Image: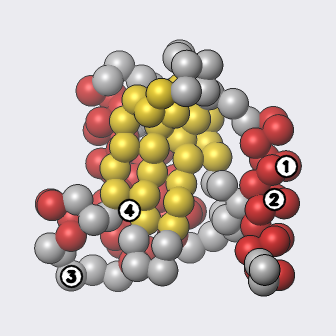
Amino acid sequence: MKNKKQERRSSIKKRIRRIVTGSAERPRLTVFRSNKQIYVQLIDDAVGRTVAAAASSEKGLAEQKVTKIDQAKLVGKLIAEKAIAAGISEVVFDRNGYLYHGRVKSLAEAAREGGLKF
């Protein structure tokens, strides 16, 4: 049985996903945050394909001893670089039921600084 926090997040997630969809020109930038790591993907919902992905557990980022908020900034910059290399400049942001605060906010701001528009 889910606890109240998980139920709240899943209902927020469903509400967001009703509105936010990704396309080939403007994929969905979705965030998943665990207790230790943060993951981000660019998804084309029309085809159901992941265009690019980045995570704090990747080789270059995992060795760095930084706070989780700084870790999220690094992941945001990395996904922006990968998106621009794939020819994507505009995305739709899907916070995946998480509050736009802390790690999610720092990831989004770093992706914007990296050149993504949303």
Residue 22, quarter of picture: top right
Whichever of labels 3 and 1 marks the residue nearer the N terminus, that label is 1
Residue 114 seen by the camera: no
- Residue at image x 56%, y 47%? 30
Q: How many residues crowd around disc 4 within 10 Å: few (fewer than 14), some, or many (20 or more)?
A: many
**SS at badge 1:** helix
**Residue type at mark 3?**
Lys
User: Secondary structure under badge 3?
Assistant: loop
Q: Are marks 2 and 1 in contact (CB under 8 Å)?
A: yes
Task: Name the residue beneath numbered marker 3.
Answer: 65
- The image shows residue 100, relative to residue 47, as above or below, that is below
> Which mark is in front, 3 or 4?
3
Judge whether 94 appears above or below 47 on screen.
below
Write down the residue under mark 2.
12
Pick the front one: 111 or 95: 95
- Is residue 64 found left or right of 22 in the rendered image? left
Which of the two marks, 2 or 3, is nearer to us in this view?
Answer: 2
Q: What SS does tag 4 mark?
A: helix
Residue in the image at 82% along x and 71% along y: 8
The residue at which mark 4 appears reads as: 73
Q: Nearer the N terminus, badge 3 or badge 4?
A: 3
**Lower sequence index among marks 2 and 3:** 2
Q: How many residues crowd around disc 1 within 10 Å: few (fewer than 14), some, or many (20 or more)?
A: few
Quadrant for the N terminus in the image: bottom right
Tell me the residue that label 1 is attached to. Answer: 15
Q: Residue at x 27, y 65 (%)?
A: 57
Q: From the image, state whether disc 3 or disc 1 is nearer to you.
A: 1
Residue 76 appears in view: yes
Residue at 21% in and 70% down = 62
Disc 3 crowd, CA 10 A, few/some/many (<14, 14-19, 20+): few
Specify the amino acid type for callout 1.
Arg
Q: Residue furthest front?
A: 1
